[in-house]
Structure formats: structure tokens, C-alpha cells
Image: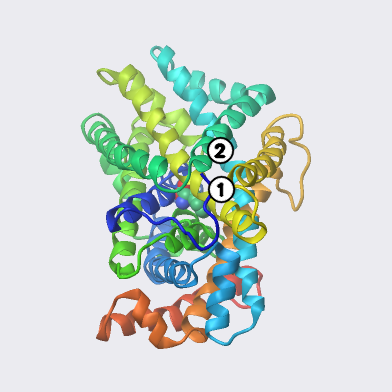
């Protein structure tokens, strides 16, 4: 089902947009990455800065990016070209779209490998984790990372799942799937939270995540937290812009973006609490790194009533959450290829997936055969994560803030956003001053220019 330029697809309703965009935002970032990054970055210091970044940078930019997509009515490159033309600005602003498309392909490459871990653990959960202790689980995870074929096999499977959905088009499949899966995911997170409260060490988890500890905040923690705020809200990678371009006129962008952010942040915090409650109850290491959820949650499943069923359900739902995000990483480049070069949707999706899949092979090998290949002390997986999350996303975000706040006509922004009076001025002032200054300062601070 190809959609020729000019006949753009549209979400069926405002709620469909909210669900689909929440589907993009809520993914491995919330359930896998947020807990492990909180663990490796000292707990509450990270959480605090992350929350500040969500409010001061994330929400305003989520609105700005959605707005540029809807106003520009196109894939990220063409949308930027059209809003720049409307504002009488340089065509060079298209580069925002290019950064997004390239960044999204890079994220998809490692995202798909990690989603592959989840698929692998879904199968393990079917067999059950009963009788396993923390050493067994550490060994299980190490064995997965050491096996290139297993990693590549699951990575390929995940990529194919995404390919099938995106080929199917914008509305039917994606929308319907999200309507069922997102509430189910929410339910399972609540269930785990219940377990965390009843059977694990919830007070320790609360202390670890929310104890006020300003002295633990350092430049690397701030950069990591800001990067994660971008990652978790899918910002700057063209995904939000493309989804925004399928949004009907007349919908309040401000309100929908608030709902999306609340859902995204809520899921991350609940997932974090549940996981750390188990970590502390079992005497595990909070700074275990990317394997954290795979080495903690199975312990809970091994001990809770109906743990087998809950375990399978959990991993299936995480896989679905990853799926609804993966799709949104493919759509921007697909829309670009279709609209710019007039090629069919099928070949466009195939090209995008093939590129990301190929890079993903290198990511899979970076855990075993190629683990010695390093640049700046980082292996391929860490390098791609750092490049996208800590550099490309904030850079694109900075440009989006500058464009929305300084280049685009104020009246046009007001018309799109759907806020009036003081509320509009608050958003506008934040996008003009707070977000760009914050992003720039964090960058400068990290490269050691100041501070
Ligand atoms: N927000 C997604 C997550 O948290 C990841 C993502 C990033 C999706 C960028 C699309 C674009 O899992």
C-alpha cells in the first residue's frame, strides 16, 4: 500500500496519535535503558536531572517537533524544507531531517539487537526460570552475548517483524496493534510494581531513586540524563516529526504531547522502582549495566506465584513495546525515500531495514568476536549509543528549538501548538531560551569549555 506524495495518510483520531506516539516513546528506553542507566549513574542524581530535562527540554521539544511535522506535511527532510521556505529561511535547515534519518537508522541497528535479547528471553521464560539463582542468570546472559549466531538470529527476526508492519502502511496495523498492546503493557508494569511492593525491597528502591543527593550530580551524569530524555521521548530522530505529519489539523499539540510524556515518564519510573526493589531484595548490583533487567526480573519470576506465565507475558510485552518503537524508527527514512524519489513503499522499507540490519550485525559482533574493536575506548555498541543519544539527538533538538523559537513566525507556531495567553508564552519562552541554553551548556560543560 504505497502512499504517493500529496495523499498523506492520517491517524484516525487524536487518541490514535497519542497511542501511536506513546508507542514510539515507550519502549526499551523505559524498561531496559532507564533502569540500567539509573543504576550506572548513581541512582537519584540521574533521576532528578532526567526529570528536569523532561520538563525543561523534552516536553517543549516534543511539541515543537510534532508542530514542525504537521506544519511541514512531509518526511523530516521535506517537512523542514517546507517550514523553512514558509519562514523565508535557508534550505540548509533540511539538515535537521537528515540528522534524524541517519540517527534513526543507527539507533535501529542497536535497538534491534537489544530487542533480540528480549525475544531470546521470551523463549527462556517459556522454559521457566525456576531454580535459577543470580549466578545462573549472570551466566545465562553472558552465554547469550557470547553467541553471535543467537544474537544475529534474533536481531534478524526483530527486524523482519518491523519490516512487515511498516510495509503494511501507517494506519491499519500500527494503530490497531498499539490500541491493544499499550494498555496491556501498562497492566503488566503495575503487576510487577505490586510484586515489588509486596515481596521485594520497595523502600530501598525509593531511596535509591529519589533520595535527594545534589552532590552526586556530575557532568557525565547530566549528559547521560539529558541524552536519555531525548531517547525516551524519541526526539530529534524524525520519528515524532513524521508521526506529527500524519496528525490532522485542529488537534491540540500541547495537550496530546503532555499525555504522551506523562505516560512515558510514568512507565519508566514504575519500571525502575520494580526493578530496583528486586535488585536490593536479592543483593544484586544496581550498576550491572545493560544486562540489568535480564539478570533481575527472572529472579522475581522464579519466585512469584504464576511466575512462569507472568514472565512470558512480561517479555512478550517488552518485545511489543520495542516493536512499536522500532516501527517509528523506520517510518521517517521510508517516507523520505517514497516522497523524495517516488519509489514504492516496499522497496523503501526493504532498503531502510537492510541498512540498519547490516550495521546491527556489527553491533551483535561487538559483544563477542569484535569486542576488542574500540574507538575512544568504546566498543561498537557503546559507540553507536553514545553517538546517537548523547550527540545527534541533542544536536537535532537544539536545531529544532532554535528553528521553532527564532526562525518560524510566532503566529504560525501559536496556530499549531494550540495554547493561548500565558500558557503559550511559557512554551515559547522555554523553546526560545531555556531548552537551547540548557542543551548548549550541557554540551559545553562536557567538552570542558566551562565548569
Ligand atoms: N523512545 C524509544 C524508547 O524509549 C526509542 C526511540 C528513539 C524511538 C528515537 C524512536 C526514535 O525505547
Q: Is mark 2 within 8 Å of ligand 1?
A: no
- The type of colouring in the image is rainbow
Q: Residues within 10 Å of mark 1 (few under 14, many from 20)?
A: many
Local SS, label 2: helix
Residue 255 higher or lower than 101, as above or below: below
Number of numbered discs:
2
Position in image of residue 99 (x %, y %): 63, 63
**Left or right of 163 in this view: 286:** left
Local SS, label 1: helix
Position in image of residue 78 (x %, y %): 59, 68
Residue 280 visible in this rendered orientation of the protein: yes
Position in image of residue 19 (x %, y %): 33, 50
- Residue for badge 1: 330
Q: Residue at x 64, y 64 (%)?
A: 98
Q: Residues within 10 Å of mark 2 (few under 14, many from 20)?
A: many
Position in image of residue 166 (x %, y %): 51, 43
* Marked residue nearer the N-terminal end (1 or 2): 2
Q: Nearer the viewer, residue 243 or 104?
A: 243
Q: Residue at x 77, y 37 (%)?
A: 372
In the drawing, what numbered circle is on residue 228? none
Q: Quarter of the image for the C terminus: give it.
A: bottom right
Residue 157 higher or lower than 289, as above or below: above
Residue 282 visible in this rendered orientation of the protein: no
**Mark 1 vs 2: CB contact within 8 A:** yes
- Residue for badge 2: 163
Q: Nearer the viewer, residue 389 or 168?
A: 168
Q: Nearer the viewer, residue 228 or 108?
A: 108
Q: Quadrant of residue 10?
A: bottom left
Q: Is mark 1 within 8 Å of ligand 1?
A: no
**Left or right of 275 in this view: 346:** right
- Residues under labels 1 and 2: Cα distance? 8 Å
Amino acid at each position: 500500500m504505497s502512499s504517493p506524495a500529496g495523499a498523506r495518510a492520517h491517524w484516525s483520531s487524536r487518541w490514535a496519535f497519542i497511542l501511536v506516539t506513546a508507542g514510539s516513546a515507550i519502549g526499551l528506553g523505559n524498561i531496559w535503558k532507564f533502569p540500567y542507566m539509573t543504576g550506572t549513574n548513581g541512582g537519584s542524581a540521574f533521576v532528578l536531572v532526567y526529570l528536569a530535562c523532561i520538563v525543561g527540554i523534552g516536553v517543549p521539544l516534543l511539541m515543537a517537533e510534532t508542530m514542525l511535522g504537521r506544519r511541514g506535511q512531509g518526511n523530516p527532510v521535506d517537512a523542514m524544507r517546507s517550514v523553512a521556505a514558509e519562514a523565508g529561511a535557508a534550505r540548509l535547515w533540511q539538515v535537521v531531517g537528515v540528522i534524524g534519518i541517519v540517527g534513526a537508522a543507527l539507533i535501529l541497528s542497536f535497538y534491534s539487537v537489544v530487542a533480540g535479547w528480549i525475544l531470546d528471553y521470551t523463549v527462556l521464560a517459556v522454559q521457566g526460570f525456576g531454580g535459577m539463582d543470580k549466578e545462573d542468570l549472570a551466566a545465562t546472559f553472558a552465554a547469550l552475548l557470547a553467541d553471535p549466531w543467537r544474537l544475529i538470529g534474533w536481531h534478524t527476526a526483530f527486524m523482519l517483524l518491523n519490516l512487515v508492519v511498516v510495509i503494511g502502511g501507517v494506519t491499519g496495523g500500527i494503530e490497531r496493534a498499539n490500541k491493544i498492546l499499550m494498555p496491556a503493557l501498562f497492566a503488566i508494569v503495575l503487576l510487577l510494581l505490586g510484586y515489588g511492593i509486596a515481596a521485594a525491597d520497595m523502600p530501598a528502591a525509593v531511596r535509591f531513586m529519589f533520595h535527594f543527593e545534589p552532590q552526586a550530580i556530575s557532568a557525565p551524569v547530566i549528559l547521560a540524563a539529558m541524552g536519555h530524555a531525548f531517547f525516551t521521548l524519541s526526539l530529534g530522530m524524525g520519528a515524532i516529526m513524521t508521526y506529527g505529519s500524519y496528525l490532522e489539523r485542529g488537534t491540540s499539540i500541547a495537550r496530546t504531547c503532555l499525555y504522551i510524556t506523562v505516560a512515558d515518564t510514568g512507565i519508566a519510573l514504575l519500571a525502575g522502582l520494580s526493578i530496583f526493589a528486586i535488585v536490593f531484595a536479592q543483593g544484586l548490583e544496581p550498576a550491572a549495566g545493560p544486562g540489568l533487567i535480564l539478570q533481575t526480573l527472572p529472579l522475581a519470576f522464579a519466585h512469584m506465584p504464576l511466575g512462569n506465565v507472568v514472565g512470558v507475558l512480561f517479555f512478550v510485552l517488552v518485545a511489543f513495546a520495542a516493536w512499536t518503537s522500532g516501527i517509528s524508527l523506520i517510518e521517517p527514512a521510508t517516507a523520505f525515500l517514497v516522497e523524495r524519489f517516488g519509489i514504492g513503499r516496499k522497496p523503501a522499507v526493504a532498503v531502510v531495514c537492510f541498512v540498519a540490519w547490516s550495521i546491527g550485525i556489527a553491533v551483535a559482533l561487538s559483544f563477542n568476536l569484535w569486542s576488542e574493536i574500540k574507538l575512544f575506548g568504546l566498543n561498537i555498541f557503546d559507540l553507536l549509543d553514545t553517538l546517537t543519544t548523547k550527540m545527534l539527538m541533542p544536536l537535532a533538538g537544539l536545531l529544532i528549538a532554535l528553528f521553532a523559537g527564532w526562525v518560524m513566525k510566532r503566529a504560525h507556531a501559536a496556530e499549531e501548538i494550540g495554547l493561548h495567553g500565558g500558557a503559550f508564552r511559557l512554551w515559547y519562552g522555554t523553546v526560545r531560551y531555556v531548552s537551547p541554553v540548557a542543551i548548549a551548556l550541557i554540551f559545553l560543560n562536557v567538552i570542558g569549555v566551562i565548569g
